[in-house]
Amino acid sequence: MTQRTLVLIKPDAVRRGLVGNVLSRFEAKGLTVVAMEQRHIDAAQADAHYHEHVQKDFYPPLRDFVTSGPLVALVLEGDEAIEVVRAINGATDGRKAAPGTIRGDLSLSNRENLVHGSDSPESAAREIALWFPQL
Ligand code: RTP
Ligand code: MG
């Protein structure tokens, strides 16, 4: 089934010059870019995006990280796009993510892990409305 998913190419990827590397993996897989914008978000946008994590111990440094510089937000579309993107991203912790995934190939961190992908159809709908209300 064709789905849309919200992806963030996080500030560590922008700082490290890895936007093209990350984006090319999604494009090569056959996913379509429906919307894409570079943004430097504030704490309120970080809190809205990560609302299920705001009470957790790891959240304050996560908020600092995602607001630390520009990121690239995009909506990708394709067959089973939500699960496909999360498989391409790899496990949350870059040290444990499988080689061949974005995090497994390019991250050594549990926080600075380069990408975000929506984790369910409900999350995707909420996140797309938050980041790209015009869609
Ligand atoms: P994401 O939401 O970014 O796609 O990542 P995910 O589903 O694989 O991981 P999630 O559990 O939703 O965590 C969101 C982001 O928070 C940071 N994190 N830090 N213990 C920690 O220090 C910790 N755990 C998670 C990561 O940046 C993770 O992607
Ligand atoms: Mg998540």
Image (cartoon, rainbow, N blue to C red):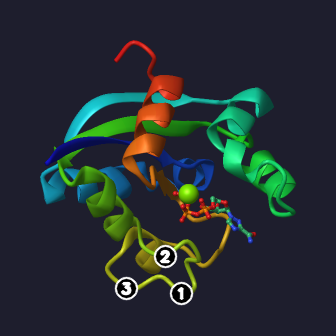
C-alpha gap between disc 3 and disc 2: 10 Å
Query: Given this view, does label 1 or label 3 mark the residue nearer the observer?
Result: 1
Dot 3, how many residues are within 10 Å of its Cα: few (below 14), some (14-19), or many (20+)?
few
Tell whether 70 sits left or right of 80. Answer: right
Point out the residue furthest to the top here: 134
In the image, what residue occupies the spot 15% across and 57% down? 28
User: What amino acid is labelled 3 in the image?
Assistant: Pro
Residue 60 in the figure: left or right of residue 102: right
Density class for disc 1 (Cα within 10 Å; few <14, some 14-19, many ≥20) is some
Compared with 42, 1 (above or below) is below
- On whether ligand 1 comes within 8 Å of the CB at mark 3, the answer is no
Kind of residue at disc 1: Lys
Mark 3, residue position: 99
Query: Looking at the image, do the residues carrying marks 1 and 3 touch, with CB atoms under 8 Å apart?
Result: no
Q: Position of residue 15 (x, y in %)?
A: 59, 51
Q: Earlier in the sequence, mark 2 or mark 1?
A: 2
Image point (76%, 28%), residue name:
44
Q: Secondary structure at mark 2?
A: loop
Which residue position holds label 2? 91
Residue ranking furthest to the front: 122
| Mark 3 and mark 2 residues within 8 Å of each other at the beta carbon | no
Residue 41: give x, y in percent of width and height: 67, 30
Nearest to viewer (mark 3 / mark 2):
2
Contact check, label 2 and label 1, Cβ < 8 Å: yes
Image point 70% across, 42% down: which residue?
A: 51
Mark 2 vs ligand 1: CB below 8 Å: yes
> Which quarter of the rendered image does ligand 2 occupy?
bottom right
Residue under circle 1?
A: 96
Q: Amino acid at mark 2?
A: Ala
The residues bearing labels 1 and 3 have C-alpha atoms spaced at a distance of: 9 Å
